[in-house]
Amino acid sequence: MKREGITILVLSLIIIILIPWTIMRWQKEEIPAEDFNIRVKMSDGNIETMTLETYLVGVVAAEMPAEFDSEALKAQAVAARTYAAKKMSQRSASDSGYDVDTTVQTQAWLSENEMKTKWGWLSYWRYFKKIGDSVKSTEGQVLVSEGQYIDAFFHSSSGRKPTERAEEVWSSSRSYLQNIESGETNQARFLKTYKFTPSTLYQKLGLTRSPQPLENKDFEIMSKTAAGRAKEVRVLGTVYKAPQLRTLLGLASTDIEFTIQPEEIQIKTYGNGHAVGMSQYGANDLAKAGRNYKEILSHFYPGTQILSLSKGKGSP
């Protein structure tokens, strides 16, 4: 009889503790979104804790031009919230004590003082309210695929080509990160030209041998992604992954064209960023064409759902 009592007690504890905890994964019971706190490592190394929604105002201010259409800003807020929520969900006993920092290594973030510096005092009040309203109107909303937060990657501009599949840029695929038309109306918006002499090219690639006049064989695109961007490039006898070469040379994107002369290579790039996920300028152009933020998110992250941290169901 005593053993049965212990068994009943254990089962009761499981029902009282475990089941509500499991349900909180998608919060079937009401938990206000403002109760979610995120730990942010500041540029001075200090860690500040703030509500998720407060944090997001600083992220949207840093990551997307405030002049953009409100529907694009809302789409950015949901993508940024999803990224932050995923980081928060990955906390463990061995974590570093913070969830995100204020750089592009996680998500860029601006304090109110930095916003005032960026926009000026007069524009600050208008833009702060505009971004705050966009965050508020999507409060608690996150993107989910197969019961998990998605990797809501975004970039500035896809340029003249569709977005990239995740596996063409990084190591693994995502069903919702595919080749998607960018929706951008000005595909040459970020057309940039870079010029490198043999000495600067050798220096940027970390080569210590004496620079030689350039030949046609010194720069060659070996393979391309399904979207048509460079995937592997051979430069001065070494094959580089295009994202790696982009970093080494400081290029805006991996959609490149080039011409070679003995004393100079000229490289043109189209677009800005890694090209995976949502194109921010594409989101703005789609918004100006009449798409709302849910349609924009569905466009760039096909097959995903918008769920609420506070209600655990699809957004109304």
Image (cartoon, rainbow, N blue to C red):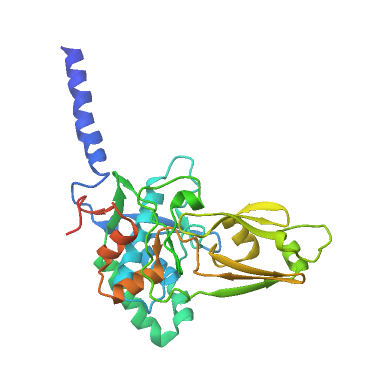
- Image-quadrant location for residue 20: top left
Residue 6 makes an appearance in the image: yes
Q: Classify residue 249 as left or right of residue 253.
A: right
At 65% across and 64% down in the image, what residue appears?
249
Q: Is residue 143 left or right of residue 279?
A: left
Quarter of the picture containing the C terminus is: bottom left
Q: Where is residue 218 in the image (x, y as percent from the top left)?
A: 72, 60
Q: Of 150 and 244, which appears nearest the observer?
A: 244
Q: Measured from the top left, where is residue 56 in percent x and y?
A: 37, 64
* Picture quarter with the N terminus: top left
Q: How many labels does the image show?
A: 0
- Residue furthest front in the image: 216
Residue at image position (47%, 48%) is 167
- Residue under the image location 20 percent in, 54 percent down: 314
Give the answer, above or below, for where 172 lies relative to 302.
Answer: above
Q: Give how far across and how far down residue 313 sits, in percent.
A: 19, 51
Examine the rendering and report whether any part of residue 51 can be seen.
no
Q: In this view, does 244 lie above or below 198?
A: above
- Where residue 135 sits, quadrant-wise, is bottom left
Question: Residue lying furthest top in this view?
Answer: 1
Identify the residue shown where x is 20% and y is 13%. Answer: 3
The location of residue 106, given as percent across then percent down, is 48, 57
Determine whether, in the image, residue 160 is placed left or right of residue 268.
left
Picture quadrant where residue 187 is located: bottom left
Q: In this view, does 28 lie above or below 185?
A: above
In the picture as drawn, the residue positioned furthest to the right comes out as 210
Q: Nearer the viewer, residue 136 or 201?
A: 201
